[in-house]
Amino acid sequence: MSGFIGLIAPGTREGGTALPEGCQEAIAACCGDFSGKWTSGKADLRFGLLKVTDDTFEERLPFSFDQRTRIIGDVRLDRRLELVRALSARFPDLDGSFPDSYILLRAYEAWGEDCVHRIAGDFSFAIWDEQEHSLFCARDHFGIIPFYYAQTENGLVVTNFYRSLEHIPGLMDVLDEEVLKSYFLLSKDGSFDQTLYKNIRKLPPAHTLAYRNGVLTLGRYWKPGDGVKPLRYKTTDEYVAHFTGIFERSVADRLRNSKAASQLSGGMDSSAITAMAEKTLRERYPGGHTLVAYNLAYRHLVKENESYFATRTARHLNISLKQFVAEDYLGKISLTPDSWIPEPVGIPQAVPERAMLADAGAYLKVLLTGFGGDPLFLFDVRSWWNMLRQGHIFRPLTDIFDFIKMHGSRPELGLKRALGNIMKKTQRKAPPVPAWFEPAYISQSYADAKTYPEGMPATTNLGMFHNPIWQNIFEHAHEGFSGGVLKVRFPFFSLELVEFLQALPPHLLHKKYLLRRAMIPWLPDEIVRRQKTPLHGGAHFQNLKSSGVLGELIAALGEEQDFLRGKINIPVLLSEIREHGKMKPGDHKRIISLIYILAWRRLLFRQNMA
């Protein structure tokens, strides 16, 4: 994994272009295998590496083939050997031993800015042309790797490492009130392009950034669903074979070392990824490999049997399983965090997943996770709309027939809602806004619009890309945000896999039928047949009753009256806190969001004063 930051002088100015050393030190704290630096009168480029691949020679960035264009970035390419073959006629010395960033630079030299239409994977990069005084940057299709930028008096700053921006004066002084409001309401940043700090912006997924002679230009190079044509085979076995090949390749592309970890919840998604990871490692490293599964268990806060199924899968695959008990960490929730994170998404010492990542990072380099499987295998009826536009008039009807034939019932069509979304005539409703929010600050209409951007839920294989929830997950898991030393990979977010599943009829996706069929050779029968079961309870909500943090919150509300004025009706909130048992689960969630915000604010304020 890699961290990078660059500063580009505005216009054609030379001299005075230098980054604070703290920026590179922040990157080196996580990416300490190599530190690189290149400066000129026009640009200052910095890089840090933590090597997580065994199949390429050492990556040394900033890198240039011709001493003209240089690349810095965090780059992992899908189907990289196919890309090498496509470039080999022009660059015969290029082969699979080159780091992905070097291959990407060759792609840029061959195809220019159109290279983004030829690549896929997890990437965030900047390519600087010193002669033309031109910067070209891009972020991957799904936003797996972050990309932040800021315009300062010294020029344009670009980075994938949020923590490095802390060291540039003025960037974190002013909050963006709209993003802060989103954190109060949704516990997350509801924006694709803005951070919590007004002066720091994000490049949205599937976008490019160009900076030439002081002029900044953004462009979008891909939209989900565009150009996807329906795929129909005669037999189910053909679908299964095609899917299995893509799924195995997706896991293998993200697993290029002999030691790895996998989150194993006990559900179908994480079990399938873990099984495919074990198969990949066994075949690729016959001399020996290490795969450790990590499972989060509960003693009493949540009624669940996930740990049983995780243990069953680990034994079947003959791999090690480490279990972390959630209650050992959730009770540490407090308004006094033990470390800083750039935005208020949790109390670090009270997040068990953070402890799991720290444990794995002590001796492993990569962790695979099953995030994204649920929406990815949920058919979106707007796919039929795309078919109609492509001239496939009767395809939706035959799809419905095939669904009834396989499952004995018709699919959940949701046609009225989908048509309303397309015609912009309906709006899904969010849960009621708690009474302790000031109506002028957060109204119900605002909550509806923010919860369902463009009127769409984030729960289908098209809708998932219209809501920033997934981008938030990727950004918060990134080492540049968390400060961790482990690369988190998301195999379900493969462009090839996503577009394949979007092209399929609904009967193959229903209840993950295709995934279950494909996993029959690799997982125990009880896992393959197990239907999704939601966790009962709500660990964080239950934990509030016994942790003592409500007392801290009551005290903090008195100290933060100026900050909360116009946002929170403190007397109403205090009344609801004291009648805690009458609160709705959604209200508990927003109280936890408030705790996160106040704890983050306290620590940020102390750091700014230091």
Image: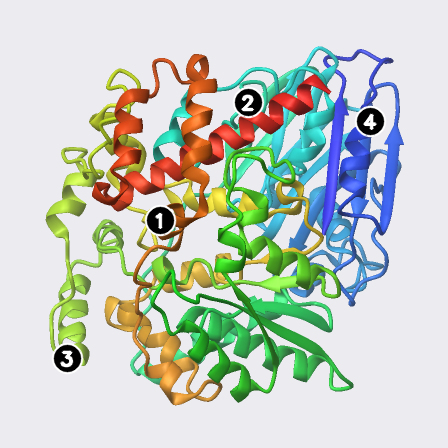
**Which residue is drawn at the image coordinates 60% and 20% (left, top)?**
216
Q: Position of residue 488 (x, y in %)?
A: 61, 56
Kindly state the secondary structure of the residue where label 3 is placed.
Answer: helix
Mark 3 vs mark 4: give the one in front.
4
Q: Which residue is mark 4?
A: 44
Label 3 – label 4 distance at C-alpha: 62 Å
Q: Amino acid at mark 4?
A: Asp
For this view, does 433 lie left or right of residue 16?
Answer: left
Q: Position of residue 360 (x, y in %)?
A: 67, 63
Mark 2 vs mark 3: give the one in front.
2
On screen, 465 above or below 83? above
The numbered mark at residue 405 is 3
Question: Do the CB atoms of the residues marked 2 and 3 lie less than 8 Å apart?
Answer: no
Q: Amino acid at mark 2?
A: Tyr
On screen, 76 above or below 448? below
Q: Which residue is mark 1?
A: 541
